[in-house]
Image: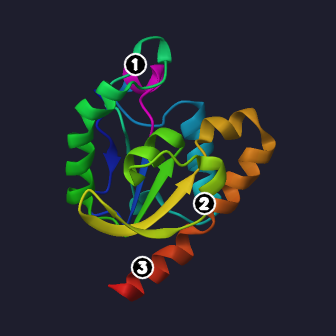
Amino acid sequence: MVFGEGNVGAQVLLIGEAPGRLEDEEGRPFVGRSGVLLRELLAEVGVAEEQLFITSVLKCRPPDNRDPKGDEISACSGWLEAQVRLVAPLVICTLGNFALRLVRGDRVGISSVHGVPETRKVFGHTALLLPLFHPAAGLRSTQKRTLLREDLALIPGLLTEARAQH
């Protein structure tokens, strides 16, 4: 089980898809290549680890690292809801389509909304939602890596905006 880690009072909640092999072995989210890239990019844009809580839609690794299935997402969504309510972040960043679609409750694709923040009620908690490409996409494509970096660079400004609203 990989429930997540970080500051329970974090201002930024990152939601990924599901644990991979390394995450499963270590019991920590985003410790593999995707996580290394994500943490590097966050540091580059000035977002400190202390500002983050990192979790995933699924809390267990799917067999053969396949995409999450609907019944698995449903089984884990209560855990994610509890995390959102506990952390009560100002900004929620979804990493990839699975997290985006669960949080928005629709079928919109990440390519059309990445980097476009919106105020959204997520499991009863209102926050700024920032859809992001999954860092795995950044490992496969330098273009996606550039877009991910640019989108992550929005977080400090969004935090300032969110603090002003509260």
Q: Earlier in the sequence, mark 1 or mark 2?
A: 1
- Give the image quarter of residue 45: bottom right
Dot 2 lies on which element?
helix
Crowding around mark 3 (Cα neighbors within 10 Å: few <14, some 14 to 19, many 20+) is some
> What range of the chain is rendered magenta?
16-25
Q: CA distance from mark 1 to mark 3?
A: 35 Å
Tell me the distance, in whole angstroms, between the alpha carbons under discs 3 and 2: 16 Å
Say which element carries label 3: helix
Residue at 49 percent across and 69 percent down: it is 118
Mark 3: amino acid:
Ala
- Place residue 86 in its image quadrant: bottom left
- Number of residues whose C-alpha sits closer than 10 Å to that of mark 1, classed few (under 14), some (14–19) or many (20 or more): some
- From this view, report whether residue 154 is shown above or below residue 133: below
Q: Which mark is residue 108?
A: none
Which residue position holds label 2? 152
Quadrant in the rendering for residue 46: bottom right
Disc 1 residue type (three-letter): Pro
User: Circle 1 sits on which residue?
Assistant: 62
Residue 7 x %, y %: 31, 57
The one of 153 and 67 positioned closer to us in this rendering: 67
Using the image, determine if residue 93 lies above or below residue 22: below
State the residue in front, 126 or 41. 126
| Residue corresponding to mark 3 | 162
